[in-house]
Structure formats: structure tokens, C-alpha cells
Image (tube, grey):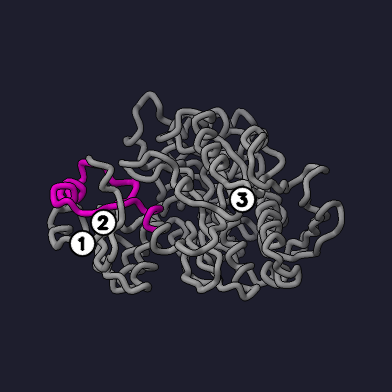
Amino acid sequence: MDLSKNRIPDPVKNIHMIAICGTGMGALASMLKDMGFEITGSDQKVYPPMSEFLSSKDIDVTEGFSKKNVAYGPDLVIVGNAVSKENPEVVAMNQMGLEFCSMPQAVNRFIASGKKPLVITGTHGKTTTSSILAWILYEAGMDPTFMIGGILKNFESNYRLGSGEHMVIEGDEYDTAFFDKGAKFLHYDPSIAILTGVEFDHADIFRDIQHVKQAFDAFITGISPQHTLVAFDDDNNVSDLVHGKSCQMIKYGRNADSVWRLGSVSIQQPWTYFDVLKHDTVFGNFKTRLVGEHNLLNALSAIAVSDTLTIPVKAVARAFESFEGIKRRQEVRGEKSGITVMDDFAHHPTAVRETLRAVKPFYPNGRLIAVFEPRTNSSMRSIFQNIYPLSFDGADIVCIRQPSLLDKIPQKERFSSQQLVDDLKRQGKDAHFFPDTDEIIDFLVSKATSGDLVLVMSNGGFDNIHERLLKSL
């Protein structure tokens, strides 16, 4: 394919989007539609909620890929990163000589143009940190634009078109497109960036931690000397990456020599109260419904950015008090017979561990029952086989499902849920293996009692286990 054709024409009226039902592509499609472009799209699996969301925007989505979908000759084709060069629409696009680009290129051209990007990066906490920052800017009257990988409850949306000068972007280290294997975040030129931490993940595209660090190194190196990186201070990988870089640097976290640090923290359900120190002086006192130290550190980075943007501390405090959180991030889906069912996106071993630590103090009168589905390309691989057993210390009962998509992984590389359960049992944990979701629901109905928290962790729909369990209890 001739990549020199990878450009965006002017003017553009009709846009076709291949693999439109991804979270980012769906948000971009909606933003472009709101801006007056005519949008069509296609995807292999078109189902709720994204299908209904796009339909509500009057966006025509076709199920399945076919050259017929681009036969009308759109001015531009936006190609999702899950699409291969063998895709029939890509083949037809190329044969017809249609102009095409990746999702980040389209964001830059149509959405971020003329804005000051605030780009949030890191292996963990991107969605939460982006959401907090977007809400602070909104509450401060700065009318931000944002594009985030989760649904903000305050907006019931993962995107917003604002007239203010800033755009909050969740910066993804995953690759851009089949014709651009560089990380998505390399397309953005941040006026301020946040780096929450760097660990190995995305085993389907990264070989090892050094390969991951190469992507982040390229991003940080690209930040201009006039712009700022807000970096977590308690991560050796981050320390290695920021050393010697030319951009402005602000550290946050736990270290005494960092500009921004967490002060005292107390819990009075449903609130977490926390103090923030700037240069060893109390900057402000805040209350939030967010739980866990990891989320307070996410909050701390957003506060550092807010102060850099000269947002008054009172406005920041108001924003934290009114922030309603993100769907699928420690989201209570319901309560039956005194049993609480919570949904969380956690899948990486660190995220599982920190999520369990975070929620446990809020449910002191019952047991914490962890239900985990390994589903990502990393978690279904044996790369974390010996690390996951260290992640469930905070749980009283552990339920591990057999991965439903395991046949996508080469046999020698596959993760074993049964081995994880055996390892947890050797550690004295009350752990159980399940081949399917039905058996998990039956087990929970027989086991859970009033006061218990059932914490379901998966990055997928998990066979709608949350609603089915609530109906069965």
C-alpha cells in the first residue's frame, strides 16, 4: 500500500469509518456527526450499547465488511486499528484510490486542531484521570472538549465538543493502524501530559517491558521544552524514562522531594477525605466518592494540571465533590438481599490488586468475593501466570472463570485459570475454578450472604453476569 496517500483531503463532507463500533471510533463518529459531517460505518459485530448509541446519532452502520460499503466513494475513510490490510473495504478503498487516515490523525485534524491537548498516558488510570480532569475543567467554566475511553456519569458520554481552548485526550499506547504500528499517543502534541506509570501490558503487540518503554520514551521525547509532563514519582520505569528529557517536569506522588504529595487520608462512607501538599504546604482539602490510594494519586495528578492552568482550588474542590465517576470503574450495579454487586474494568494484575485494596474498607461488615474473567490479549497469556496469585490478597473468596476467547491464543502461550486457582489454594485462599458464567452465578447465589460485596472484574461484558446475578439473588 502506498502510505504517501495517507492524508486528509480538503474539503471533506462524507466520511466512512471501518470498525466504527470501538469505543474510540464510536466517539469520533459521533463528534464528527455533531460537527455536520455525513458519516457511514461498518463493523464485524454490531450490537448494543454502541449500535444503539450510533443509531441515536442517526449514523448508518452496516454489519459486516464489504466493498459495497465504500462503493459510494466517500471523501475520506477512517481505518480503525483492529482492521487488517486484507479487509475487503481496505482493499476496495485502495483500488478506488480513496483518501484514508487513522483515528488519531482524524482527531488531530477535525477535533484537536486549534486546541491545547491535555494528554493522559500510562499503563493504569488513564480513563479515571482523564475523566477527573475533564470534569474539573468543566466545573471551572473552561468548556473543555474531551475524548475518553469510558463513559463519564456526569455527562453520560465519553466525548464532548466544547468551545474552550483545551482538549482532554486519553493517550493510548496501543498501535495506531495496520499502516502505522506506532502508539496512538505519538500523534498528539500535548501542552501538558500526565504519565501515571509504566508496566508491561498488551502482550499481543509488545515483546517485553523494554518494548513498552520505547513507545513511552518516544512520546516523552516529543514533548517540547516549553510544555509540561506531570510524572508519577514512585515508578522505576517512569524515573528511567523522564531522566534527561528536555520538557518541563512536575513530579507527584509519595516522595518527599516531589512538588505534589498526598497528605492525610480518611474514610467516612461514602466519602474519602484527603489533603494535598504542594511544596510541603497544604494546598487544599478535598472530598470524593473515588476509593483507593491509586485513585487519589490519579486525582493528585489532575490537581497538579489544574493548578498549572490556574484553576482556583475552590473550583477543584467543588469538582471532586460532584464527580460521579465512570461506568465500569468500581460501579455499583445493584444490591439484593443486602448483597452488593460491583462492576470493574480491572484485568492487569496490578489493577486487580489495587481495586481489591480500594473497595475493601468500604464494605467492612461482609466478605469481598472477587469474580475475575481473564479476557484481554495479555491476561489470556501465560505472561502473568505467576503474578496473578499475588493480586487477590484482598479477597475473602475468589472465583476465576475459564477465558471464553482462549482459542485466539497459541496453545503454548495460554493462561491457565485452573493453575491460578490451584496456586491461590496453596496460599490458603478460598478459590474456585469455573468453566462458564452460569456455574459462577449458581455458586454466588448459594454462597453470598447479606453484607457481602461481589466484585466482578473483566474488560468485557462477562455474559451480562451483573444483571443476571442480581435477578437470581
Residue 393 part of the magenta segment? no
Question: Considering the image in quadrants, where does the N terminus appear?
Answer: top left
Discs 2, 1 touching: Cβ within 8 Å: yes
**Amino acid residing under circle 3:** Ile
- Specify whether 85 is left or right of 320: left
Residue lying at 45% horizontally and 33% vertically, measured from the top left: 206
Tell me: residue 155, above or below residue 241: below
How far across and how far down the image is residue 92, in percent?
15, 50
Q: Is residue 386 left or right of residue 9?
A: right
Q: Kindly identify which residue carries mark 2.
A: 77
Front residue of this view, candidates 174 and 13: 13
Q: Compare residues 376 and 252 and report the one nearer the observer.
A: 252
- Tag shown at residue 194: 3
N-terminal-most mark, 2 or 3: 2
User: Callout 1: helix, strand or loop?
Assistant: loop
Asked which quadrant contains residue 8, the reply is bottom left
Q: Residue flagged by tag 2: what amino acid is it?
A: Val
Question: On screen, 36 above or below 198?
Answer: below
Q: Is residue 101 magenta?
A: yes
**Residue stretch in magenta:** 79-106
Structural distance between the alpha carbons of marks 2 and 1: 7 Å
Residue marked by disc 1: 74
Mark 3 neighbour density, 10 Å: few (under 14) some (14–19) many (20 or more): many
Q: Alpha-carbon distance for marks 2 and 3? A: 31 Å
Q: Position of residue 169 (x, y in %)?
A: 51, 57
Residue type at the position of mark 1: Pro
Front residue of 273 and 170: 170
- Residue 192, position as x, y percentages in the image: 61, 54
